[in-house]
Image (spheres, grey):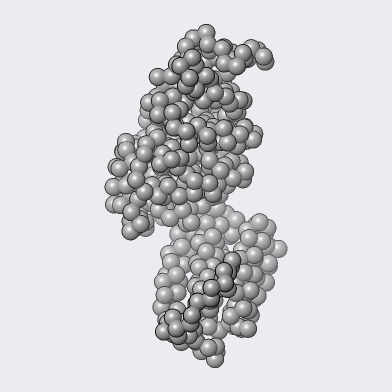
Amino acid sequence: MSAFTPGLKLHDRYLLERRIGSGGMAEVWRAHDLVLGRPVAVKVLAGPMAADPALRAGALREARSAAQLTHPNITAVHDFGEASFPDGHAEPYLVMELLTGDSLADRMAAGPMPWPQVATVGGQIAAALAAAHARDVVHRDVKPGNIMLTATGAKVLDFGIAAMTGLPDAHGGWVIGTPAYAAPERLQQAAANPAADVYSLGVLLVEMVTGRRLHPVESWEQVAALHARPRPLPHLPGVPSTAAALIAAALDPSPARRPRAADLQRVLTGAPGTGHGAVGVPAGPTPTLLAPTGGSISGAARVPSAPATRQYVPPPPQMIRRRRRTPVLGFTLLMVLLLVGGMFVLFSAMRPTDGDASPPPATTRAAVKPSRSPSPSPKPTRATSIAAGNDLLLDIGQRATTLVVTGDIAPGHAGDITSALTALTLRWNTHQWKSVINRTKEFQKQLDGWVDDGDVSKDAGEELDGKLDELIDLADELKG
């Protein structure tokens, strides 16, 4: 419990009226802004969260990042402050816009949602996340209780506890979020990554369609056990094959293989029956919910870093039943590209065929006495450059797969891309650098032609062309 009481005035501006929600470590109050004359929601961080110096120090920075987000599907953060009390302690709080509607958690409690409504709500959530990620803000707690369904569309709440991309995801050992919706990599307490929000949205989409919890866990320890032994996804009734493929990709254990929030937005908002208006607010008297009753803070817990040896196994390809009349070419391409990825290991052990010198043996490298002069950026070795090329080829294949699924690349070109990448992989791992350069340039011309014909979007063409330029540069260095 916080020290907030009805009638308390925060910084001579926000007059507290009544508490309308509470969780383990957060409370939400209805208040009145005396300066602008409007009702607002005030969320106070209490308990261990408010007492932790690291969390309090980071709260202001995160509130500032949230206040920069202006989007129709994001709840506005108006203000941030700390209330001081006579006993010397202080409690930080956020001032947010007041929303009228129902929470997604309440709607989901009524049972499965029809696909058109799921696509509408999911598309609007994805749009909010894409806008946040474009400004390097990661939400970290996408869940039903943090989504409001209003007359103007879905609203994502609680960006006030967001983090900036690349900054630590944990605060002094605290992992903020709700275990049942957290991505597996969050157990590592690494840098904040937008891919974690995409995973949470994937969980949400499955639960909206099925009406059942995907991960029935309550603690971070249970999360670790769950992801160590993943289960297949349930059947998604009524979901188009392309959308089902993208949802499955969003739940990939590897953050690097997940689509972007913008990719999900394009597919979901393009689905039949979707739109950008109201999302199912019930008729009759409309309930008022100022902010999530549980609050993302209520799910915080201290957890140990996950063991470095843990490996997350992706679900089997049979996890989704697809309609026979709509082939998922994106998945077909992915499976072929995974086969190509396996070829990297096979051909990396082969000797070069164009006369390039092999890397010096390990004993020769070990015999060289290291220099005492510091080197700020060691020159990449031949072996690391070859490995970088393999990684780049795999990245191109994975990105192309997503672009086929999102419609940025016409499905008819999936086989052409697979053939081109297979040929490049063979040449790369047999060290045919000149041939790699020539074949890559041919592929770039082919890609430009698809863009001119409208079969590949301009953005997708530029993205893949840039990655192919990197491959040419690497091959040129190795050739020289």
Given residues 178 and 155, the one toward you in this image is 178
Q: Is residue 152 visible?
A: no
Quarter location, residue 270: top right
> Can you give x and y, in whole percent of width and height, for residue 287 in the image?
48, 17
Residue at left offset 43%, top offset 19%: 2
> Can you give x and y, in whole percent of width and height, for residue 339 in the image?
42, 70
> Can you give x and y, in whole percent of width and height, for residue 444 in the image?
65, 70
Residue at left offset 44%, top offset 81%: 366
Farthest residue to the front: give it.
Answer: 372
Farthest residue to the top: give it.
Answer: 7
Question: As displayed, is residue 464 above or below residue 161?
Answer: below
Question: As displayed, is residue 169 above or below residue 415?
Answer: above
Residue at left offset 53%, top offset 36%: 58
Given residues 445 and 134, the one toward you in this image is 134
Residue at left offset 57%, top offset 54%: 407
Q: Quadrant of the N terminus?
A: top left
Q: Is residue 320 visible?
A: yes
Farthest residue to the right: give it.
Answer: 452
Question: As displayed, is residue 343 above or below residue 9?
Answer: below
Q: Quadrant of the C terminus?
A: bottom right
Residue 429 as seen in the image, left or right of residue 461: left
Total labels: the figure holds 0
Given residues 172 and 281, the one toward you in this image is 172
Residue 263 as seen in the image, left or right of residue 179: right
> Can you give x and y, in whole percent of width and height, for residue 458 in the image?
68, 58
